[in-house]
Amino acid sequence: MDLFSFESRRRIGEDNVLRKVDALVDWGRISGLLKGGLKRSGLGPQGYEPVVLFKCLLLGQWHGLSDPKLEESLRVRLDFMLFAGLDLFAPIPDETTHCRFRNALVRAGVFDALLGEVCRQLEAHGLKVKQAEAAIIDATLIESAARPRGHIEAPARDRAESQAPPDDPAVSFSADGDARWVKKGRKSTLGYKGFARCDEEGFIDKVHVTPANAGESPEFGTMTEGAKAQRVLADKAYASRANRERLKGKHRDGIMRKAARGRPLKASEKRFNRLISKRRFRVEQCFGTMKRLFGLQRARYFGLAKTHAQMVLAAISQNLLKAANRITLSTRTLIAL
């Protein structure tokens, strides 16, 4: 260990969240996933190690930094340099390197695999249950990074998207061609709908992004793919015969019951809904954390693929923060509380 690293660790202390995360993750396995889809052009003029640039992306997501602000912070913050593995006299990745690296990862399509690897490592540490009792599914709105140039008269209403006519794909309402309008309450939003699946401890293991006017119920099959939980919990937006059929033989049905015209809910169905509601709050907490701490309330970039990547980074950051808060860092080992 060089003098810079030694003094940095001493000043930062053992309770620093970034130090805990750095010790918690096997970055070698992360590096393997990164190298699988990257080319030399995505690693900057200095040919930085992919894992160094990925750590920089996490820092930018964690602290809500633009690429120029991230470059500046990497020059002056000891904890950033230590986490990213940058020496005091080493060159610092500039803002264009961060941008190109992120775009290269989007093209390579490795973000979902990175989230899966982080979840696997947390399971190996015993911080995340490998086969949880319940998987919780829900969606949230993400505002587009673009300022809308126009507004449609009757945007799809949230949770009633299937009843609205599709907008004309030839009409451009903003610079963000993938974003769409949806109306929730009295507010119309141009953007995306971000889906998340978490366990009852609040660890997210799957995300999915669609235009904001896409219905929630048709995405249920996508969100249940690969789920290992015994039961799948979801609200009334997913209550359909097709979705209940998807669960048969795989998971227990935890979709809330929905009343229909001429068929009010029975007392037993109301009790069932209350029980599900008491367990679904975890996914709402996840959305709150990702929006409040990691800037997911608004997309940073244009396009569906880049917004998906942003949500994956927010989910990884949320999982690592939750895990870091459960461990104590000693000089040699991580002890799970």
Image: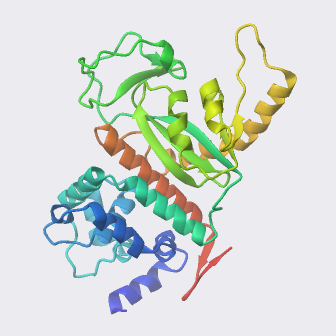
Q: Quadrant of residue 255?
A: top right
Q: Is residue 139 left or right of residue 189?
A: right
Is residue 240 shown to the viewer in this render? no
Q: Picture coordinates of residue 167 (x, y %)?
A: 34, 16
Q: Is residue 158 left or right of residue 72?
A: right
Q: Residue at x 80, y 32 (%)?
A: 272
Residue 197 versus residue 20 in the image, above or below: above
Q: Residue at x 28, y 38 (%)?
A: 302
Q: Quadrant of residue 69?
A: bottom left
Residue in front for this viewpoint, 75 or 261:
261
Residue 166 versus residue 6 in the image, above or below: above
Q: Residue at x 34, y 92 (%)?
A: 3
Q: Picture coordinates of residue 113 (x, y %)?
A: 42, 57
Q: Residue at x 53, y 53 (%)?
A: 205
Q: Which part of the image, by quadrant, shows the N terminus?
A: bottom left
In the orientation shown, which residue stands out farthest toward the right?
A: 267
Residue in front for this viewpoint, 258 or 55:
258
Q: Quadrant of residue 75?
A: bottom left
Residue 41 versus residue 230 in the image, above or below: below
Q: How many marks?
A: 0
In the orientation shown, which residue stands out farthest toward the left?
A: 45
Q: How is the image coloured?
A: rainbow
Residue in front for this viewpoint, 322 or 38:
38
Q: Picture coordinates of residue 329 (x, y %)?
A: 57, 80
Q: Is residue 280 left or right of residue 320?
A: right
In the orientation shown, which residue stands out farthest toward the top?
A: 262
Q: Picture coordinates of residue 265 (x, y %)?
A: 79, 19
